[in-house]
Amino acid sequence: MTNQIFSSRDQAVLWHPCTQMKDHELQPVIPIRRGLGVWLEDFDGKRYLDAVSSWWVNLFGHANPYINAALRHQLESLEHVILAGFTHEPAVRLAERLIDLAPKGLSRCFYADNGSSAVEVALKMSFHYWRNRGQTGKTRFVSLENSYHGETLGALAVGDVGLYKDTYAPLLMQVITAPSPDCYHREPGESWQDYSIRRFADMERLLAEQADKICAVIVEPLVQCAGSMRMYDPIYLSLLRDACDRYGVHLIADEVAVGFGRTGTMFACEQADIRPDFLCLSKGITGGYLPLSAVLTTNDVYQAFYGDYVAQIAFLHSHSYTGNALACAAALASLDLFEQEDVLNRNRILAQSMAEAAAPLVDHPHVSEVRQTGMILAIEMVKDKSKREAYDWRERRGLMVYRHGLKRGVLLRPLGNVIYFMPPYVINADEIEFMATVAKEGIALATAGA
């Protein structure tokens, strides 16, 4: 089997996600035969460094021996059982361990299948909580400009990236959008912390005026990932937690992309020393092996749904694969690796290597910013650096970097004109240097003559 044969078969039957399929007339899909560590290998034997963790899910490398063994062991006893009225050891153990790791006060774990589903669960729980408590006027949600929370209808509604949302606007509930603390827009000389504090004034005003209508505020802590990897200071989360408490509004932390070590701590909320009312987790939860998500919440929320059947206050949201035993086993193995290998400390060293490798781009005439939070580093290409004038999106400069990366053996999948690194945690210094070198080459090609 060759790449060409497999790609032809693919184009005859598959419809790929987040893709204009006509593009594949010029850039055929790349069929992957195997993966190992940070590397993927196609059917022609060419290797690609997975700089995006296969869309932010892989933590400990492809075909990780420890996670593989855990899955084989679980396969011998139980693959799946309905989680309504039944339970099993991996689901219970994983819930126990997540609660132990999460900010104190999160004491209940509700499983779903993916990040969007976790967000749907949190939104519905918050709305339903206030209804069960008799505060039926609370029906609105607040989210940030440039936010992204998934692509099911509820999750899409609380996002603010027009590329994904605008087409479906007639189908979506109306939300309240607050200005983002995105520090890309700070004034010259203004610190991330000062800008984030300044932007919080708008959120404070909004909550003061409309708290009686609001169920919850939902945010991506520290990094708006699909929103071009824009970043902000933890102080914003501290101020938001305090305001939500004062105004009687829930706080939903969507850590689907930023959880499990991506920002330098196990959960991004830790950097602000806060506890959300709902913590949404997915992506890296299984180390990149199987779909799974979890929503952690408080006993106060749990008790609002606890009562006699005739009261009709139960939370009836469900998925057939809720708490899948294989997915839970993979997640448990991933948590084992965090403990056994001191991953967070090692990631701090890797993050520094990434910063050093990308440092030459700070002075590039068509790079407006190189920004980083933990193991997430982003490089923003612009037409005019002094004015921060963006390239016309129709020029698809990021696509030029992507195609160059594939030629050189690195999977870089830009967000528009933003090139980013979010590699698996098993990457080494030499691989980081190679990844950055290829990105520099691609950026030079994409901005030549601009």
Image (cartoon, rainbow, N blue to C red):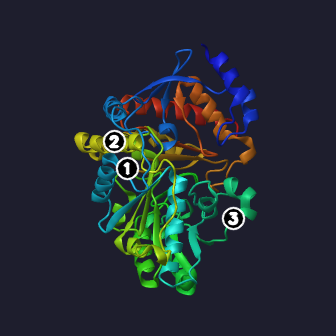
Tell me which numbered mark, 2 or 3, is placed earlier along the sequence: 3
Which residue sits at x=49%, y=79%?
132
Q: Quadrant of the C terminus?
A: top right
CB atoms of marks 1 and 3 within 8 Å: no
Task: Using the numbered discs, state the Cα–Cα distance from disc 1 to disc 3 in whole angstroms.
Answer: 30 Å
397 on left or right of 132: right
Q: Is residue 111 above or below residue 26?
A: below
Residue 104 position in % (x across, y down): 29, 66
Judging depth in this view, the residue of 155 and 56 nearest the camera is 155
* Marking on residue 172: 3
Task: Using the numbered discs, state the Cα–Cα distance from disc 2 to disc 3 in whole angstroms.
Answer: 36 Å
14 on left or right of 254: right
Under mark 1, the amino acid is: Phe
Which residue sits at x=52%, y=29%?
410
Under mark 3, the amino acid is: Leu
Q: Quadrant of the N terminus?
A: top right
Choose mark 1 or mark 3, whichever is in front.
3
CB atoms of marks 1 and 2 within 8 Å: yes
Judging depth in this view, the residue of 330 and 245 nearest the camera is 330
Tell me which numbered mark, 1 or 2, is placed earlier along the sequence: 1
Q: Is residue 236 above or below residue 374?
A: below
Do we see residue 274 in this rendering? yes
Q: Residues within 10 Å of mark 3 (few under 14, many from 20)?
A: some
Under mark 2, the amino acid is: Ser
Report which residue position mark 1 lands on: 260
Q: Secondary structure at mark 1?
A: loop
Which residue sits at x=31%, y=69%?
105
Task: Using the numbered discs, state the Cα–Cα distance from disc 1 to disc 2 in whole angstroms.
Answer: 10 Å
Report which residue position mark 2 lands on: 334
Residue 292 position in % (x across, y down): 45, 47
Q: Secondary structure at mark 2?
A: helix
Q: Secondary structure at mark 3?
A: loop
